[in-house]
Image: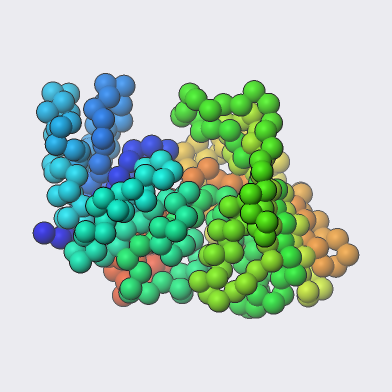
Amino acid sequence: MKDSRHVHVIGTGTIGEPLIGLLADYRKELGIETVSFHKRTPLPSERAKVRSLMDRGALLCTDDPAMAKFEEQGLKVSWDAEESIDRAAVVIDCTPSGIGHENKQKYYDRFTHNTAGFVAQGSEFGFGKMYARGINDEALNADDKFIHVVSCNTHNISVLLKTLAITDNNPDNLVEAKFVMMRRSSDTSQDGDFLPAPKVGKHEDSRFGTHHARDAWHIFQTLGYDLNVFSSAIKLNTQYMHCLWFNIRVKEKIDLPTVMSRLTENRRIATTEKTSANQIYSFGRDHGHYGRILSQTVVPTKTIAVNNDHEIIGFAFTPQDGNPLLSSVAIASWYIDSDQGLEKRLDCLKPYLFHEI
């Protein structure tokens, strides 16, 4: 019994919770009638979070065995797991890594006749067509039942490549690009996984290094591009923001004013005089939605340099999980109203797409 304007989110973690809140707060502007979410475990410590989401207008769903316990906490359950998927026009899976694939086999494959689209987040390689808002929207088509919204760091790589190297839709301008991903060890909401010292990552892919460049390659492959990209990764003992260093070599001769112009003219890129993750993270906390900056990247302009007229070098901060949030809202709106322009639907989110930080 599908509702053509119903979005269902599975998971209430660091991406799921702000996504549910964002969809619920702006459902009218986004063309959505109802938003529901699946919470598996009725933890007393998370009762306030669930109630807050419900106060925003989102409907709680869970598995049959947990229904009574949620009700005992004063939290009304609307539907069970399967009915909530069956009713949805769009299902967005925000569960931890690997569970999205399990849910696809257990649930989603059985509802493709009834649901417009299923969306997975982050580390779910192979779930479906890779997508990042503003990078490969033109690659979407009506047959795309499964979409994989790439990770926040892959969003960052992709927007830098498209803005600085692939000008006028010319991928041949890119000679090569290398990235060093400096990742926070855990989110500020997480008590575990914090590192006492930096920890370097393996180059598990001989062509791309880490999954960040591999996934960026797949994003552009949906447009028919074959890019020469490579990434390395290191985890740092911080909970604030991911950061990356980049070296993008292009065929065209380029100078610093041209680079700066491309960065400042892209409305999905935030530029800043700040060079501290502390200050940028604090800006998002104070001015973002759920503390999130929805821009694709934050580029500290003081770090940008041009070497030998062909190499663009600098640093960029990744806005937590804000960029996948934007892509998830965009793809949900596209599934619901593919004939409506995404720009028009997403106008309501412009206050969180900062041009300057």
Q: How is the image coloured?
A: rainbow
Look at 54% across and 32% down and name the residue there.
186
Look at 66% across and 41% down and name the residue there.
201
**Residue 193 percent location from the top left of the image:** 53, 28
Residue 255: which quarter of the image?
A: bottom right
Front residue (pair 141, 269): 141
Look at 13% across and 43% down and name the residue there.
79
Q: Is residue 48 above or below residue 136?
A: above
Query: Where does the N terminus fall, quadrant-wise?
Result: bottom left
Residue 89: which quarter of the image?
A: bottom left
Q: Is residue 109 above or below residue 102?
A: below
Q: Is residue 204 above or below residue 114?
A: above
Q: Is residue 331 left or right of residue 294?
A: left
Residue 146: which quarter of the image?
A: bottom left
Q: Let me know if residue 354 appears in the view.
A: no
Front residue (pair 349, 78): 78
Q: Is residue 135 left or right of residue 5?
A: right
**Residue 159 percent location from the top left of the image:** 59, 61
Front residue (pair 45, 128): 128
**Residue 178 percent location from the top left of the image:** 72, 57
Q: Let me know if residue 136 appears in the view.
A: yes
**Residue 333 percent location from the top left of the image:** 33, 62
Query: Total number of numbered labels?
Result: 0
Q: Is residue 250 left or right of residue 281?
A: right
